[in-house]
Image (cartoon, rainbow, N blue to C red):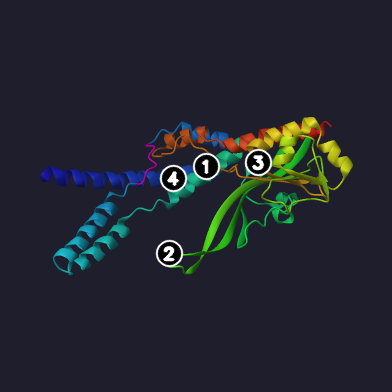
């Protein structure tokens, strides 16, 4: 019995020391991130971490008193309601002693974002330079939801292809349909069905007035209907534009093959405004999602490993497809 008590005391003592060290490490990392060093230099400091590297929050006390509270509920049911008072006191004390993970989560979230910005030259924050990117709501692609349509999680960037700059914005399009259904008793009820698409808006596209619409958005047609001459491509998409000469120039066999390959993976709606060279490409691939090979973070070394192995595979594929399209259309 004494050994058990000693082990519990040691566990609580270790918990206190560990959480104190973790909080100290959070403060040190935040100071490094606020320094004038480049992110590469900051990451190098984390790689060479010499002190205790703990980045875990332990809450043994919290879970112990939550367990005691659950036991007291059972005793209140089985023996006497007086145990409900013990339940309230136990749970209240559990939350009082709980160490919050908020500061740790905020630090990890911030450094993960900085890492992606550095690795892919992205900007997660809106600034005045982003005003040159046309609003998604100016495109006829964002009224799929009959209850709500929302653009969120915007990420900004700039590509340079053959010395031409292409500002762009990645985004998540979330829309909601309101559907009237009946329950098992035959009574009417309203359901809200949520859907997500993703896409890119890119400026300075080397063409205007072109629509390649999937079957779900028949309304996204421009004035002149067109056929590419490729039966499979024409069967998958509705082609239209504002000028027959522009359409003939755009939908050459080489371009159609290239677009078909790109849209096979990012199938959706490819729409270029008629009055400005602004492209919106909407599809069902999550291009803003980061893929992490290493999920669990208990130490500074775990954090560094995660940062080094994090990628955005769908974004990389989109970038490759866009570069191929831009280079091909630039050369015509």
Quick check: marks 1 and 2 in contact, CB under 8 Å? Answer: no
Q: Real-space Cα distance between discs 3 and 4?
A: 43 Å
> Going by the image, does 133 lie left or right of 40?
right
Total marks shown come to 4
Percent across and percent down for residue 266 are 64, 39
Q: Let me know if residue 94 appears in the view.
A: yes
Quick check: marks 2 and 3 in contact, CB under 8 Å? Answer: no
The crowding category of the residue bearing disc 3, from other C-alpha atoms within 10 Å (few below 14, some 14 to 19, many at least 20), is some
- Which of the marked residues, 1 or 2, is nearer the chain's N terminus? 1
Q: Real-space Cα distance between discs 4 and 2?
A: 53 Å
Quick check: marks 1 and 4 in contact, CB under 8 Å? Answer: no
Position of residue 320 relative to residue 22, above or below, is above
Percent across and percent down for residue 87 are 23, 63
Percent across and percent down for residue 60 are 28, 49
**Residue shown at the point (25%, 47%) measured from the top left:** 12
Q: Real-space Cα distance between discs 1 and 4?
A: 14 Å
Of the residues tagged 2 and 3, which is closer to the observer? 2
Res 112 label = 1
Locate the C terminus by quadrant.
Answer: top right
Of the residues tagged 3 and 4, which is closer to the observer? 3
Query: Residue under circle 4?
Result: 26
Whether residue 54 appears in magenta in the rendering, the answer is yes
- Which of the marked residues, 1 or 4, is nearer the chain's N terminus? 4
Of the residues tagged 1 and 4, which is closer to the observer? 1
Query: What span is colored magenta in the figure?
Result: 52-57
Query: Residue under circle 2?
Result: 184
Mark 1, secondary structure of its residue:
helix
Query: Residue under circle 3?
Result: 267
The quadrant in which residue 162 appears is: top right
**Residue shown at the point (33%, 43%) measured from the top left:** 18
In the image shown, does 181 or 286 lie closer to the viewer?
Answer: 181
């Amino acid at each position: 019995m004494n050994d058990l008590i000693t082990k519990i005391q040691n566990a609580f003592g270790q918990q206190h020391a560990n959480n104190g060290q973790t909080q100290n490490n959070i403060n040190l990392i935040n100071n490094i991130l606020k320094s004038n060093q480049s992110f590469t230099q900051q990451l190098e400091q984390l790689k060479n971490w010499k002190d205790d590297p703990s980045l875990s929050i332990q809450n043994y006390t919290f879970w112990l008193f939550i367990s005691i509270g659950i036991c007291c509920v059972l005793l209140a049911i089985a023996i006497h309601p007086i145990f409900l008072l013990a339940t309230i006191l136990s749970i209240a004390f559990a939350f009082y002693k709980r160490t919050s993970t908020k500061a740790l989560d905020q630090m990890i979230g911030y450094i993960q974002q900085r890492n992606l910005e550095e690795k892919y030259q992205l900007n997660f924050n809106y600034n005045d330079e982003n005003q040159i990117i046309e609003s998604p709501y100016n495109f006829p692609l964002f009224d799929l939801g009959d209850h709500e349509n929302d653009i969120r999680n915007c990420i900004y960037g700039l590509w340079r292809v053959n010395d031409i700059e292409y500002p762009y914005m990645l985004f998540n399009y979330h829309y909601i349909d309101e559907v009237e259904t009946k329950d098992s008793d035959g009574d009417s009820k309203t359901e809200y069905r949520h859907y997500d698409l993703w896409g890119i808006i890119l400026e300075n596209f080397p063409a205007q007035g072109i629509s390649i619409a999937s079957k779900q958005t028949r309304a996204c047609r421009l004035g002149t209907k067109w056929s590419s001459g490729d039966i499979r491509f024409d069967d998958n998409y509705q082609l239209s534009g504002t000028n027959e000469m522009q359409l003939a120039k755009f939908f050459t066999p080489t371009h159609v093959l290239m677009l078909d390959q790109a849209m096979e993976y990012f199938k959706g709606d490819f729409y270029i405004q008629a009055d400005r060279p602004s492209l919106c490409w909407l599809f069902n691939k999550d291009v803003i999602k980061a893929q992490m090979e290493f999920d669990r973070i208990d130490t500074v070394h775990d954090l560094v490993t995660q940062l080094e192995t994090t990628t955005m595979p769908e974004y990389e594929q989109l970038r490759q497809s866009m570069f191929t399209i831009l280079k091909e259309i630039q050369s015509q």
